[in-house]
Amino acid sequence: HLESKTLLGVDFIKSAKIVLNIPEMKYSFVDKPDREFDLIAEPESLTKQVMVNSINTTLALREDEGINLEPVEKDRVNLLLHQYQEIFGENGEPTPYGTHYIRLTDDTPISVPPYRLPPTKKEALRQEIEKMVENDIIEECDSAYAAPVVLVPKKDSTVRVCIDYRKLNSITVPDRYPLPRMDDLLESIQPAKCMSTIDLRSGYWQVSVNEEDRDKTGFITPFGIYRFKRMPFGMRNAPATFQRIMDRFRSGLVDITVLVYLDDLVVLSADLDKHLEDLSVIFERVKLFKLNANR
């Protein structure tokens, strides 16, 4: 018997002439095939630990998360994240639970000259446009609508493409669907020991624009005119459209405290066991709605 655990690889197995019988969990030696020995399986707890250690580290809890959890409790959370890793990917499909419509008081197309961009910004815009086309967010078009582009710097030195839809918004029929009041959300919070926040990945881009309205989203660049296939940021009724979808998302959730404000969700539970159950239900609904979350 070895005093410490040792990992024996294929080279050792070949040199020792070991024959493995995995279906029956036994092994023997080439020169003594009639004498078999039992393969001893690892305890289930160790198997689970190996699974935890093999989880994609981008899904596992970060150092600033779960700071009040014991190591075993963190492992349980990590296993749940691993189980639902598909919702943290990049699903190319829009949600089937809502569509963005654009109704105008005046059907005369609005066209605004493009804002000037220095050469370095043009290259950054070109790269972002290519990504958005590749991800099926926008497409080239010959729309008579043309809103100007504004580039906003991000913390990671890249840029965010924003469209100045102020003139279009001024003739957009408002959607009066209510957004939650922050004070009402805060008042609805019940005492809880566990809380998780879920941020949907570019939430608006997970919603389709009604095909007949897509030309109205047209925007002008040095490389041509494009229109949105997914709901753009900066449109007057985009928050109402998204909140309507998320209220459908929350509908029917029984015995689960989940606060929803646009693409931010907060799940509150009395203890870890209940919290993991609640998160499982929420993650299943994220899958059902074909949404994706940041990790």
Image (cartoon, helix red, strand yellow):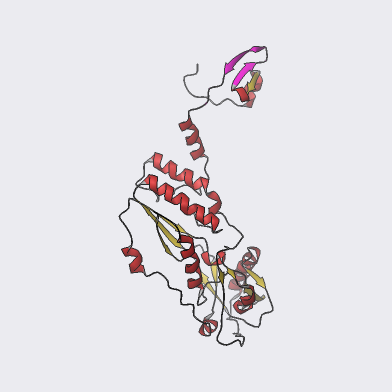
Of 53 and 251, which appears nearest the observer? 251
Indicate whether 89 appears above or below 79: below
**Residue 20: x and y, percent?**
63, 22
Residue stretch in magenta: 26-41
Name the side, left or right, on which 32 lies relative to 200: right
Name the side, left or right, on which 120 lies relative to 47: right
Q: Residue at x 58, y 80 (%)?
A: 148
Q: Residue at x 51, y 84 (%)?
A: 170
Q: Residue at x 33, y 64 (%)?
A: 186
Secondary structure, magenta segment, majority class: strand
Name the side, left or right, on which 182 lies relative to 156: left
Q: Residue at x 49, y 80 (%)?
A: 174
Please tell me whether residue 15 belongs to the stretch shown in magenta. Answer: no
Please tell me whether residue 40 belongs to the stretch shown in magenta. Answer: yes
**Residue 245: x and y, percent?**
50, 66
Of 212 and 5, which appears nearest the observer? 212
Of 137 and 156, which appears nearest the observer? 137
- Location of residue 225 by image quarter: bottom right
Indicate whether 24 appears above or below 285: above
Indicate whether 228 appears above or below 144: above
**Residue 15: x and y, percent?**
65, 19
- Location of residue 151 by image quarter: bottom right
**Residue 13: x and y, percent?**
63, 22
